[in-house]
Amino acid sequence: MLQRMTLALMFLAALGAYTVPRADATIVIKKTLTQLSAESERIVEGKVVERSAAYAPGTGIIFTHYRLRITRSLKGQAVQSLVVSEVGGTVGDITQRVAGMPQYALGETVLLMLKKDALGHWRTHGLSQGAFRMNWNPAAKDWVVRLDRGLSHVWSKEVPKDMRSATDTVALEDFEDVVADLVAKAQEKKEKK
């Protein structure tokens, strides 16, 4: 009996030695639309027209760089295009993913809240919390913003219920008005200090 228990323990220890540790968590500080609007250096709408991935120099970290053709700037200097860089992506046979980090598809239209990182790269502020996907609504012949139910803490207080559809979309123009109002309030608050 003792010999069987010893063998079983040795087997479990050996099995544990071959287990690869994983890090599946990302700590995300919850932000509201008010906070994101105030803290972001730029808020832009645009279409993803180019995507490329590369290792950050001197590291084993992959960044995916998304070039956006800007259609509207809601905060910050107006530009025609800019590059947003996010951690994760694929280079050759190596893929890195970071939970909570936004990814964008070629041709996708987005509204992004951006802030520069320590390296001077534009990054989506608040990880996925600062990314809003846009879709064309053929019935209304207008753009709508999709409100991610998993991120309702971001928008539920600032986007009134009567603006939202049953499918958690809001007319782009209404969403722009909400964001513009939040940006103006943040600027007023900053000037009073």
Image: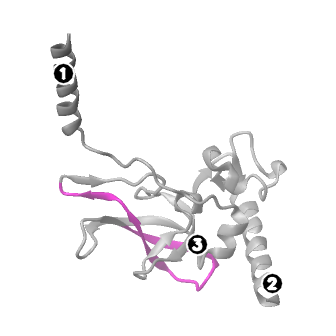
Q: Quadrant of residue 73?
A: bottom right
Residue 12 is situated, as x and y percent measured from the top left of the image, at 23, 27
User: Residue flagged by tag 2: what amino acid is it?
Assistant: Glu
In the image, taking residue 69 as reference, residue 131 lies left or right, namely: right
- The nearer-to-camera label among 2 and 1 is 1
Count of numbered labels shown in the rendering? 3
Name which residue lies at 21% across and 32% down. Answer: 13
Residue 98 is situated, as x and y percent measured from the top left of the image, at 40, 54
Residue 156 is situated, as x and y percent measured from the top left of the image, at 75, 52
Separation (CA) of disc 2 from disc 3: 21 Å
Secondary structure, mark 2, is: helix
Of label 3 and label 1, which has the lower sequence position? 1
* Magenta span includes 155: no
Secondary structure, mark 1, is: helix
Name which residue lies at 59% across and 58% down. Answer: 129
Separation (CA) of disc 3 from disc 1: 63 Å
- Which mark identifies residue 6? 1
Of label 2 and label 3, which has the lower sequence position? 3
Q: Are marks 3 and 1 in contact (CB under 8 Å)?
A: no
- Which mark identifies residue 188? 2
Residue extending furthest toward the top: 1
Query: Residue tagged by mark 3?
Result: 44
Of label 2 and label 1, which has the lower sequence position? 1
Residue 119 is situated, as x and y percent measured from the top left of the image, at 39, 81
* Magenta span includes 91: yes
- The nearer-to-camera label among 3 and 1 is 1
User: Residue flagged by tag 3: what amino acid is it?
Assistant: Val
Is residue 11 visible in the rendered structure shown here?
A: yes
Q: Tell me the magenta residue range.
A: 65-92
